[in-house]
């Protein structure tokens, strides 16, 4: 799934989007960064409410390409700066994590519409 | 079998650039050993022996008429006509190269034709040299050596100083410094990446380094991360000045945590750090003395962990 699916089809707001051609093949939903670190697949989207700089560090180290901040969580400037530096995309949405996970699973063709 | 085992289409770019950049005139031998039409095969045989060549072009001035090869001489000896003049026995069906052709042409000519040497003509059709597979391979080896040398020097220059794969780097980690948390791990990851270590291995090392680093940030009074890069593995050690872990067994249990609520609100302290580290490491050890401090060490091999040697 191309990351542009998040903005174009799902209407999520892009906060940082360094590579418009980037694509992912998995997603992972969690707020426990150790859980993300230990279990998230690489080339994936992280669906979370953890809107801070450390989330970017974890994403970068775990090979995650994009972070979707749910439930209207905002990203502080130091988070978007870090994301830009590490080449990681950050999006925000008013969807909660359950809804975002379900929609992204559709985009990844993991569930039927 | 290919005479010169270099594919002129699919070789590495460096090689392709080389065989297109080098011209036939750069590799050919200019010291010509020629004979005239009237020269006898016996005299040519003597020239071949004396000059250590296997083919002699027959010329008239600078124009090539034919070629006498070692095979022609052998046949002449067998057939008893070694006293014949060259003009009577030479091969006239000549395949020639031009001096301005790229070496890649010469390589494919040797693949396509059974000859071991080609005469080289300039644009005025004058004989200016001879080229053998040996001329080409020798020159290519010299040029490839130069290229490899240049590549090695470029690689060495592009690495920041002090990041050789063999070496030790230390990072000071402060208590509750979530601001800088992860910097040591990021740097370890970048060093491994610069040295071409496989991504899944880098990921495991990054996870181990990050968990150990976060443990120092969350739980310790401060400490250091020591990354020891070896040729075949990385050893990541986290050492702190306290407070020490009362029960290692508890600390190694997934879900067990002593983190404060605000640390948990950041997404840390889920009780997965040490179990995660152990999971991604080839070797993992931890020792702690209450009040004094803790030392945890993770080892990750770049390829496969060798069998125990004790």
Image (cartoon, coloured by chain):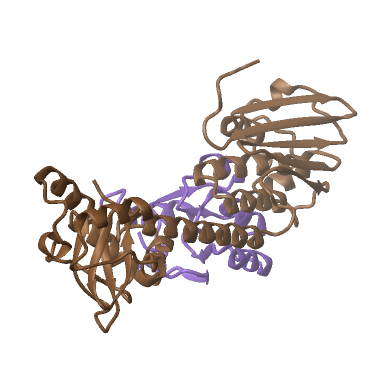
Q: Where residue B274 appears, x then y in whole percent?
A: 66, 32
| Vertical placement of residue B251 versus B131, above or below | above
Closer to the camera in the image, B310 or B10: B10
| Vertical placement of residue A54 versus B250, above or below | below
Residue at the far front in the pictured view: B83
Closer to the camera in the image, A61 or B9: B9
Chain B: drawing colour: brown
Closer to the camera in the image, B174 or B53: B53
Looking at the image, residue B154 sits to the left or right of residue B27; the answer is right
Q: Where residue B261 appears, x then y in whole percent?
A: 73, 43
Residue at the far right in the pictured view: B291
Q: Provide the letter of the chain coloured purple.
A: A
Q: Residue at x 55, y 60 (%)?
A: B151
Q: Across the whole image, how many numbered discs are drawn on residues?
A: 0
Residue at the far top in the pictured view: B310
| Vertical placement of residue B18 versus A97, above or below | below
The answer, for residue B4, to whether it is visible in the render is: no
Q: Quadrant of residue A3?
A: bottom left
Report the quarter where the C terminus of chain B lies. top right
Closer to the camera in the image, A58 or B5: B5
Looking at the image, residue B164 sits to the left or right of residue B10; the answer is right
Q: Residue at x 20, y 63 (%)?
A: B67
Report the quarter where the N terminus of chain B lies. top left
Q: Residue at x 49, y 58 (%)?
A: B142
Looking at the image, residue A59 sits to the left or right of residue B166; the answer is left
Q: Where residue B145 appears, x then y in whole percent?
A: 52, 56
Q: Quadrant of residue B309?
A: top right
The answer, for residue B169, to whether it is visible in the render is: yes
């Amino acid at each position: 799934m191309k990351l542009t699916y998040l903005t174009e089809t799902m209407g999520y707001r892009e906060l940082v989007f360094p590579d418009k051609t980037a694509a992912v093949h998995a997603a992972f939903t969690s707020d426990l960064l150790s859980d993300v670190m230990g279990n998230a697949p690489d080339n994936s989207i992280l669906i979370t409410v953890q809107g801070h700089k450390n989330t970017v560090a974890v994403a970068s180290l775990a090979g995650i390409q994009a972070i979707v901040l749910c439930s209207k969580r905002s990203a502080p400037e130091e988070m978007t700066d870090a994301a830009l530096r590490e080449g990681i995309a950050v999006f925000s949405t008013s969807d909660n994590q359950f809804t975002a996970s379900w929609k992204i699973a559709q985009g990844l063709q993991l569930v039927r519409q | 079998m290919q005479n010169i085992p270099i594919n002129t289409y699919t070789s590495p770019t460096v090689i392709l650039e080389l065989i297109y950049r080098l011209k036939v005139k750069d590799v050919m031998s200019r010291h010509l050993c020629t004979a005239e039409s009237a020269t006898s095969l016996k005299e040519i045989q003597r020239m071949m022996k004396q000059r250590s060549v296997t083919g002699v072009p027959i010329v008239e001035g600078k124009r090539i008429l034919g070629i006498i090869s070692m095979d022609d001489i052998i046949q002449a000896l067998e057939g008893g006509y070694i006293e014949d003049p060259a003009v009577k026995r030479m091969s006239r069906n000549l395949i020639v190269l031009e001096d301005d052709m790229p070496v890649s042409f010469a390589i494919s000519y040797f693949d396509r034709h059974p000859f071991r040497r080609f005469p080289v003509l300039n644009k005025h059709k004058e004989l200016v040299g001879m080229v053998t597979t040996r001329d080409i391979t020798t020159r290519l080896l010299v040029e490839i050596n130069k290229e490899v040398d240049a590549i090695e020097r470029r690689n060495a220059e592009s690495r920041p100083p002090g990041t050789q794969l063999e070496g030790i780097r230390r990072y000071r980690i402060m208590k509750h410094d979530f601001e800088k948390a992860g910097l040591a791990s990021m740097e370890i990851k970048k060093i491994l990446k610069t040295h071409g270590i496989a991504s899944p291995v880098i990921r495991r090392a990054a996870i181990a380094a990050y968990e150990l680093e976060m443990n120092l940030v969350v739980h310790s009074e401060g400490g250091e991360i020591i990354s020891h890069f070896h040729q075949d593995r990385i050893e990541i050690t986290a050492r702190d000045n306290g407070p020490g872990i009362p029960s290692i067994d508890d600390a190694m249990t997934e879900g067990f945590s002593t983190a404060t609520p605000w640390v948990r609100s950041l997404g840390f302290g889920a009780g997965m750090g040490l179990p995660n580290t152990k999971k991604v490491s080839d070797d993992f050890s931890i020792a702690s003395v209450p009040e004094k401090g803790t030392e945890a060490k993770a080892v990750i091999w770049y390829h496969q962990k060798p069998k125990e040697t004790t």
